Amino acid sequence: MQIILISTLSLVALGVLVGAALVFAGKKFRVETDERVSRIRECLPGNNCGACGYAGCDAMADAIVKGEAPVNGCPVGGNQAAVQIAAIMGVEAGSVERKVAFVRCKGSCEYTRNQGNYIGIQDCRSAALSGLVITDCTYGCMGMGSCVTVCPEKAIRVENGVAVVDRRLCVGCGLCAKACPRGLIELVPASAHVAVQCSNRDKGPLVKKVCQAGCIGCSLCVRQCQSDAVTVENNLARIDYSKCVQCGACAEKCPVKVITPPVAPAEGDTGKAG
């Protein structure tokens, strides 16, 4: 009986010592958490998409409090989140230009041809890794929907062999752009009325052989632009949206009509997020 009592008291004493040690360690090594992190986290949309450049919304909130990220750094949350976060941080929010995804390819089935039937995993990345050339244009959309799979908002679909973005649903997270193995998807201002719907960097005659809707690098759009917003680089027209005034002159002059609206503008869409 005495042995049992001594053992019990020993265990109780050991438990008290371990508990005291844990309390001491907790106080000694406790990391103070700024309450602003949790408040900012509540302002963020929770997509955890990584469009801000951080691993997720928690990491973004922590970076904002540390001064490593701007208060308007979340493209998905837009102006609404920026204003709320700025109030918490006691700074000015600044404006956020809402962006949407745009597929730089117009080579649907009516403009280009398939070289054969692909039999395998219906995923653009897998098909690209196989090394097979499926369509005549080796720069164009593969149409297997890797971008569709990763879109959290169901804002992108494949129509007639080419991915198409619905700007009204797109939140500009950029996941589709990361998923495209050919780098065809870019983020453009939601207010943009013109965009170059091609990625083929070959010279004009070669482009015409593989796609009737491709950019031929003729530079007519460059000469038409009064804002120096359009250039031709590597035989492909590019638009600098920081200079573009949305006059549409380049689109009107384009002989192959490859400069087009990103999508039909949503009613009342000014391009500002939030």
Image (spheres, grey):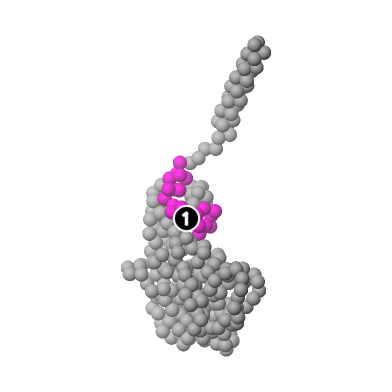
Q: Nearer the viewer, residue 222 or 258?
A: 258
Identify which residue is drawn at 57% across, 81% down. 114
Read off the magenta span. 35-56
Looking at the image, which residue sits at the far top? 2
Question: What residue sits 64% from the left and 70% below the top?
Answer: 129
Name the residue: 52% across, 67% down. 147
In which image quadrant can residue 96 be found? bottom left
Q: Residue at x 60, y 23 (%)?
A: 15
* Residue 117: image location, x then y, percent: 59, 78
Residue 94 placement, left or right of 52: left
Q: Is residue 219 left or right of residue 85?
A: right
* Residue 34, percent from left and from top: 48, 41
Q: Residues within 10 Å of mark 1 (few under 14, many from 20)?
A: some
Q: Is residue 214 above or below residue 177?
A: below
Residue 25: % across, % down: 59, 30
The image shows residue 22, relative to residue 54, as above or below, that is above
Q: Position of residue 143 (x, y in %)?
A: 53, 73
Does residue 189 appear in the picture of this structure? Answer: no
In magenta segment, residue 136: no
| Disc 1 element | loop
Residue 153 placement: quadrant: bottom left
Q: Is residue 29 visible?
A: yes
Q: Amino acid at mark 1?
A: Asn
**Residue bearing the label numbered 1:** 47
Quarter of the C terminus within the rendering: bottom left
Image position of 15 (left or right of 57): right
Q: Is the residue 119 above or below the residue 72 in the image?
A: below
Location of the N terminus (image quadrant): top right
